[in-house]
Image (cartoon, rainbow, N blue to C red):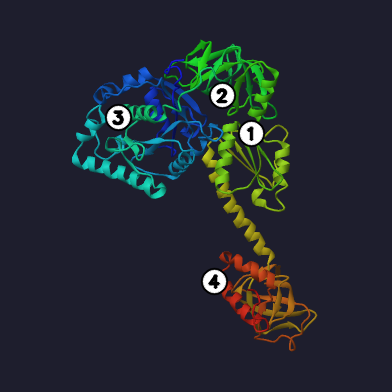
Amino acid sequence: MNKEKSTRSPIVSVLGHVDHGKSSILDSIRETNIVSKEAGAITQAIGASIIPLEVIQKKCGSLLDQLKMKFTIPGLLFIDTPGHAAFTSLRKRGGALADIAVLVVDINEGFKPQTIEAVDILKNSRTPFIIAANKLDLVSGYTNKNSCLLDDLKQQHESTRQIIDERLYKIIGQIYDRFKINAERFDRVEDYTKQIAIIPCSAKIKVGLAELLMVLTGLAQKYLEQSLKINVSGAAKGTILEVKETEGLGKTIDVIVYDGTLKVNDTIIIGGVLEPIVTKVRALFQPAPLHEMRDKKSSFVSIKKVVAAVGVRISAPGLEQAVAGMPLMNCSDDEQRIEKAKKKVQEEVQEVLLDTEKQGIIIKADSLGSLEAVIKLFGEKNISIRKASLGAITKKDMADAESNYEQDPLLSVIIGFNVELGKNVEISKRVKIITGDIIYKLLDDYLLWVEEKKKALEAEQLEELVRPCKLEILQNCIFRQNNPAIVGVHVIAGVLKTGNPLMKTGKALTEVKSIQSEKENINRAEQGKQVAVSLLGVMCGRQINERDVLYSAIPEQDFKKLKKLKKYLTDSEIQVMKEIAEIMRKDNVVWGV
């Protein structure tokens, strides 16, 4: 086996904040336009493109001659990830599938929340990366002078060069402050093992892309050469990108093969929701170079075998239950080996699918990769998950979510990525369903809903408590002495409600049976109101008198809860609480503490 045959193309992942130009950079390299077809202009399904070595050499052109670089890797396999950085979850277990990554940052905006999350993921999975500082064309004063980036930068006006440097050093500062990672403009890097290279570029006017490809390929070849060696005759391992109906073939799967060799007539085992799928490869198709696998106009060529790393379309019987994101491997027809492979593949699936007895939200998604991404995203915010599975929202999902309501209404939620409500599923008033086709927005929508729901629940809780209230019995306003006593009062502060216990000293004296305002019965009277109240169990002239000041007799437990809900009380209510605490602490110094 010669060395070239045993070296595979590095798998390149492209990440970054939404709208910073991830897909646009790939489109410029491929000279295609995938970006306009995506939900919210964000790539939501993982696509792949093969950039062969001869294309890289052609694009880099004279740059390679100047630097006397000779590439030996077969090319680059680009995976275009969706808007949210969490979707690097096209994974081999134990690390990112990508060998190297391009982090796209808008040179004018710098680091944003998803940029930070992307670096977190790359750092955690120890994936080397470079930074594409995109949208150079939008820098104030910039005009394209030369096809070579460094010559182009030298020919800019001095003030423009200064702005570009300021923007780059802002990015350098941000990545160092947050992650203690050193970065520098690619031509100023002294040691690529200690500094991250930043390449200023513009996907729109195709400046800096040759340099980007050159640095990427050079790094992959220099530092990843050993890890790119594969056993050509070894078992194929891959991940399903997409399941689709192909004219004349029926159900087919688009797969990234990241290890080994896959041939026509091979037995393949694919992870399943309930059990693994065992089938035989009927045909293999490969996209033509520089074609996006998801592009309907893409031309596919029938082949007999593929060697990693590669994107391939597989035609095989029994793919009806196949799901995107599932692992795939081939093995010989030996029954024992098939059973062993089934077990291994299904273990990977079970790592993602969740079903626990504990409380938590329900997550549904259309593919294993999406499900993994949503779980990761919500897990990072310490949101407990009870169940995570694939497919439409079912009656069982609805029942599971509703069963959370009594203990924690904030967990009575179903999150659905790219899924719909199943047939005959009735919506429950107790269950919040949040669905969408942009991953990060699901989390934003959930967190916003939680805030609103918390406020509503706390407001409800406040209504159930005895609120702070201070009132004075008005002079010449005793309308009945007793049974019940009816008197006119002025609400000095707070809210007076029917059923409220009242006191003068530290003991409840009476209870408000009813409130009347202008001969109409009302349930509550706000601060400043003068109303007539009927009071149980007291006699005017004995327990109560004109000009007496009464307070709501707040039970100690209610008082403690009110302290936690203080943000919903007025300043005058908070003052009344202090006065009530003073009265109560004459007999018990730790009352309400």
Q: Residues within 10 Å of mark 3 (few under 14, many from 20)?
A: many
Going by the picture, which residue comes out furthest to the right? 483
Q: Does 310 appear above or below 536?
A: above
Q: Nearer the viewer, mark 1 or mark 3?
A: 3
Q: Position of residue 357 (x, y in %)?
A: 72, 45
State yes or no: discs 1 and 4 in contact (Cβ < 8 Å). Answer: no
Q: Does 204 appear above or below 553?
A: above
Badge 1 is on which residue? 420
Distance (Cα) linking label 1 and label 4:
47 Å
State yes or no: discs 1 and 2 in contact (Cβ < 8 Å). Answer: no
> Residue at the spot x=58%, y=46% of the render?
446
Badge 4 is on which residue? 571
Dot placed on the residue nearer the N-terminal end, 1 or 4: 1
Q: Does 38 appear above or below 262?
A: below
What is the secondary structure assignment of the residue under circle 2? strand
> Residue at the spot x=51%, y=16% of the render?
306
Q: Position of residue 4 (x, y in %)?
A: 42, 18
Horizontal relation, residue 513 to residue 561: left or right: right
Dot placed on the residue nearer the N-terminal end, 2 or 4: 2
Badge 2 is on which residue? 237
Image mark for residue 207: 3
Distance (Cα) linking label 2 and label 4:
66 Å
Q: Nearer the viewer, mark 3 or mark 4?
A: 3
For badge 3, the amino acid type reads: Val
What is the secondary structure assignment of the residue under circle 3? loop
Dot placed on the residue nearer the N-terminal end, 3 or 2: 3
Q: Residues within 10 Å of mark 1 (few under 14, many from 20)?
A: some
